[in-house]
Amino acid sequence: MTNDTRKMMHLTLFLTLSIVLHAFDPGLNVLGAKLGIANIVGIIVLKWYGPKAMITNNLLRVLLVSIMRATLLSIPFYTSLAGVSLSSLVVIILYKLFNPSVLMLSVASSIFHPIGQIIVISRIYSLNQVFILLPLLLILS
């Protein structure tokens, strides 16, 4: 088995794991907040395989979960996509600049994920009042 084959097999397993963890994330029952354990898989993929692999894992997870839940191209899809995109971007920048621990990257991801979601919700509904939820969401992060 070549190294490329082994790498693809590992990345496929990480994608599967992130989908399963996303599907069974118990949530906090406050404003739809979840623990975000699937995002930890993306951070581990970043540490082991780099930014491209993390972006691929995170975007495919959002796409495949939305297809399985029949929410593709709906508001939950766009909010999830925005949250994972912004948090991934910030985590990659922090990783490149400072190479922090997995814990610090996880904290940064959990902070920026709801910010991305709130921005998209405010644009979809043309409603800036939704930003009032941001302090509570950041506390939950």
Image (tube, rainbow, N blue to C red):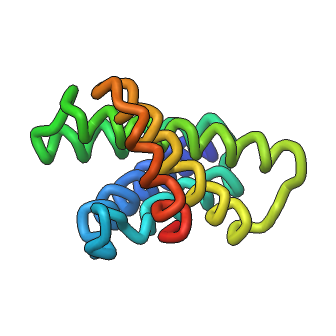
Identity of the residue drawn at 64% across and 65% down? 107
Task: Looking at the picture, tell me which residue is in the foreground, 13 or 88.
Answer: 88
In x, y percent, where is residue 16? 34, 56
Q: Position of residue 87 (x, y in %)?
A: 58, 45
Report the front residue among 6 and 124: 124
Residue depicted at 65% across the width and 50% down the height: 46
Q: Nearer the viewer, residue 119 or 27?
A: 119
From the viewer's perspective, is 100 left or right of 135? right
Is 29 situated left or right of 140 in this image? Answer: left
Residue that extends furthest to the left in the rendered view of this protein: 70
- Above or below for 100 versus 68: below
Q: Is residue 101 above or below residue 63?
A: below
Whether 69 is drawn above or below 121: the answer is: below
Question: Is residue 1 visible from the viewing direction of this image?
Answer: no
Image location (x, y in percent) of residue 106 = 62, 64
Q: Residue at x 30, y 62 (%)?
A: 31
Residue at figure coordinates x 32%, y 75% from the top left: 28
Q: Tell me which corner region of the image, top left, top right, bottom left or bottom right, holds residue 68.
A: top left
Residue 59 percent across, percent down from the top left: 43, 37
**Nearer to me, 47 or 104:** 104
The answer, for residue 16, to whether it is visible in the render is yes
- Residue 80 shown left or right of residue 9 in the figure: left
How many marks on residues?
Answer: 0
Give the answer, above or below, for where 43 lies relative to 116.
Answer: below
